[in-house]
Amino acid sequence: MRKDTLRGIEVAIQDKWEEAKVFESDANSSDAEAFMVTFPYPYMNGRLHLGHAFSLTKAIFRAQYERNKGKNVLFPFAFHCTGMPIQAAANKLKAEIKQFGCPPKFPEQDPAVLAKMVEEAEAAAKAKAAKSTDKSKGSKSKLVAKGYTGIVRQWNILTKMVPVEEIPKFVDPQEWLQYFPPHGLADLKKFGCGVDWRRSFITTATNEFYDSFIRWQFNTLKEKGKILFGKRNNIWSVLDNQVCADHDRSEGEGVGPQEYTIIKLKVLDDAPDDYVSLQVLKDKPDFAAKYNITPSMVDPFEVVPIIEIPGYGEEGEACATAKVVCEKLKIKTFNEKDKLAKAKDETYLKGFTSGIMRVGPHAGKKVSVVKPIIKKEMIDAGQACLYFEPESKVMSRTGDECVVAATDQWYLEYGEDKWREAVEKHVFSDNFNAYDPASLDRYRQSLAWLKEWACTRQFGLGTQLPWDEQWVIESLSDSTIYMAYYAIAHKLQGVDNLDGKKGSPVGIKPEQLTDAVYDYIFRGKAYPSDCGIAEDVLADLRKEFKTWYPMALRVSAKDLIPNHLTMALYNHAAIWDDEPGMWPKGYYTNGHVQVDAEKMSKSKGNFLMMDECVDMYSCDATRFACADAGDSLEDANFSRETADNAIMSLFTELEWVKEVVSTKGELRGNEDMVFMDNVFDNSINRLVKETDEAFSGMRFRDGLKTGWYELIGARNSYRDWCQVSGVKPRADLYDKFIKVIAVIMTPIIPHWSEEIWKLSGGEGFVVKAPWPVVPVEDKLLTKQSSCLFKSLRQFRLTVQKSKKKVNKAVIMVVDKYPSWKVDALVWMNDNIATIEDSKKFMGELKNWTKQLEDKKNVKNVMQFVSFVRKEYMELGAVAMDQTVPYDQKELFEGVLKYIASQLNVEVDNIEVVDIGKDGPPQGCKNSDGVGPGKPGIFTMS
């Protein structure tokens, strides 16, 4: 019922948003600062899943946050259809129908055949388990237990997404383009994405508008000398007879060609594996005999050292490094694979980086220097040759294991010095925000290795290369500056026109979009008078582009850093080489999402589709759990329990707001504020600021913590105090709380926020409401309330630990620090300049404590200073006041009823004592820990 209530609200709110066109943005719609955020268009060979949803929320959240901050926000969205995957899937389906009929009757559907396949799979699993050192897993895998055969049929994949009677249509690749993008759009609307859908489109030549844009892009790149032709080594699918790029692969994304040198050797090299094998064959003749190896084949041979590695032998002499390392690690057999791997890494690394040749014509030179020289000498002498293979296994989406081939290719000259240096200068400048040093380091690595990129294929969907139409532009290469197309897509295509077949809202025809027209729109070149498009129409398109560019933020999963994201930087730097101000201003990347701390997998039953999540948990509860899942490059965790709990929490808060609104007349009016009123009000002000800072830094989990959990916690404390104290809550404070939480939670839970906003009497839509403007936090009041609530937690623990029921309690306070703490505070004030530099500050503290006379107290001083420093980082200079800047006795006496209720003690049996004046209570032995701002409690039964 709770979930259904939330879903009912969401559907109604989404209808109102669509009717009011609240997410449509134009260059003329506002004088506010423009902010365009984009997300990589998903590939349309299936429905959208939770992995898409999780990464997408980062863009959704930030777009809505900036909208509430008063910016003119554009969040567009499109659908990618270019490349191999759709074509390959259509071909596979066609082959299945041809071979097995329609509907197909696959061999594994025959019980006898299936039993045989399962039997074989089980035998293979048992054999694998027998070899494994982990005997606890048993001999039967989960997949075998479920009767899984390992055969993936395209027909079966489609049955999970498409009505069975429609599947035969999907032998035509165009059917995929017509079916999945509209479903993707519907799923995204259901997820409450806040997109300007007028700017949506699909890629490939099917969309003649987008096709013309890509042709212009490639003509421009060629004109600028960025596209060349020639033989290049690329990952190659023999089955497809073409290059297999990252998006064309089912396994091995990011893997490139690796160069090797083939050398015919009469002797072994310095690998630890070879050394250990030689020793085993010498020591175990019976074992050697199994392989027809006689003693005469191994006994006469000893290791011949040729390289000196400092630290692995006598200085100035060559050493047998493999022998030294194997003896050090106590490796006796070649079955010790982990040790051998470690030995190999150490031997090869040290040999290359530190090794010095001690024999041959290059004796005395470093291995790292002479390696390429020796390689060339051997190749020239016919003693060696080069060959290439993938760095690791690569499988194409057509099921082909790929190789490396040197073929004629059109390629983008990524890595060219001047081009790369321009991109590097931008990425590592103040003009670009990567949001995370770890992400920035990945861009550094990608820019170092990304080189000449084959940008065309001879098979697949896409745009034909304008000057050589036997080639089709591949999927990563046609998706690098399409963000610029978003700026004008609503004028070229408009709403409900993904493929552009319905024509342009402003009357432009695809064939009119010449290179000269695009040059005018995107590069500010002269108006082409012969284009057939009115100048004012093109001027309007130019204005749209100038409004939304540069792109403020692009959000993506981390796996696109080495390809798409880096390529987009390269292409922006090429197209707008004379306008660096048009290059992307920021990229935010996140890790992949797991479900309940496990990788999403159909076999585990935790593979969740986007629309499925909305149906199960509601849109807002799903988004809530996505926000809670995490924000870093590390893999995040979507917790289904969190989503379930969010349903309860959202529903409960909704009901509370309804109750408050209906009983508003019974609440307290605008009389003088008492202490807890001020505490609640100040907490709201502080948490608004902290949530603001979190969202602006893409830390949505932190923002959820402050803007939801802590804000509701502050409300709960205030409500409890009012209830216990017999004081009604202030109506204006409840109204402020409701309006504040509605607005600051809009980025994450907009439908709930919209409903709360309406109930509270807010004007218009909350998605258009301004971010709350609140007074500056009163840090002294924060310190008082912090002291109160921290003390209460400690008091409760003390009472809970008491072996007897507590009937009486004395709260002990003191206004002055002892002299040694005063001295420490004076020292801290004198060294305030270094307090934020932890390492330097603590080093200076250690030097100062060495001068103290009371050596036994040094530990206490260190702990005290560390505590105060932490408070300083949170509260500022007030943390180092030598006396508490408020009356502690008055503070606690003012809320005694509340304290009594928390401790389950009669209020008349609690008193507050200043032990600095009156001394500790009789029998109290724990007053030493009491200090200014650090009360203690003495309990009695």
Image (cartoon, rainbow, N blue to C red):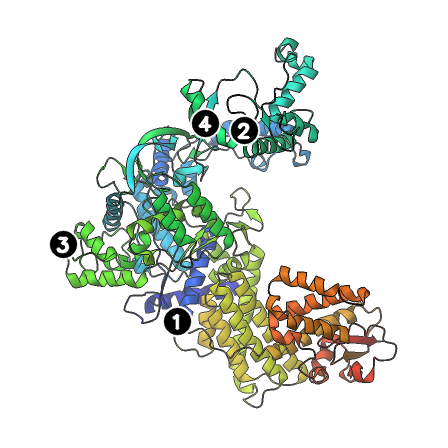
Q: Earlier in the sequence, mark 4 or mark 2?
A: 2
Residue tagged 1 = 70
x and y percentages locating residue 818 in the rendered image: 77, 76
Q: Is residue 757 left or right of residue 215?
A: right
Q: Nearer the viewer, residue 617 or 196?
A: 196
Marks 1 and 2, how far apart at CA:
64 Å
- Closer to viewer: mark 4 or mark 1: 4
Circle 2 residues within 10 Å: few <14, some 14–19, many ≥20: some
Q: Secondary structure at mark 2?
A: helix
Q: Earlier in the sequence, mark 4 or mark 3?
A: 4
Q: Are marks 1 and 2 in contact (CB under 8 Å)?
A: no
**Amino acid residing under circle 2:** Ala
- Closer to viewer: mark 1 or mark 2: 1
Marks 4 and 2, how far apart at CA:
59 Å
Q: Residue at x 33, y 51 (%)?
A: 573
Q: Are marks 2 and 3 in contact (CB under 8 Å)?
A: no
Where residue 941 sits, quadrant-wise, is: bottom right
Q: Residue at x 43, y 28 (%)?
A: 388
Q: Secondary structure at mark 4?
A: helix
Residue tagged 4 = 373
Circle 1 residues within 10 Å: few <14, some 14–19, many ≥20: some
Marks 4 and 3, how far apart at CA:
58 Å
x and y percentages locating residue 837 in the rendered image: 60, 62
Q: Earlier in the sequence, mark 2 or mark 3?
A: 2
Q: Secondary structure at mark 1?
A: loop
Q: Earlier in the sequence, mark 1 or mark 2?
A: 1
Marks 2 and 3, how far apart at CA:
68 Å
Residue tagged 3 = 531
Q: Is residue 13 left or right of residue 788?
A: left
Residue tagged 2 = 115
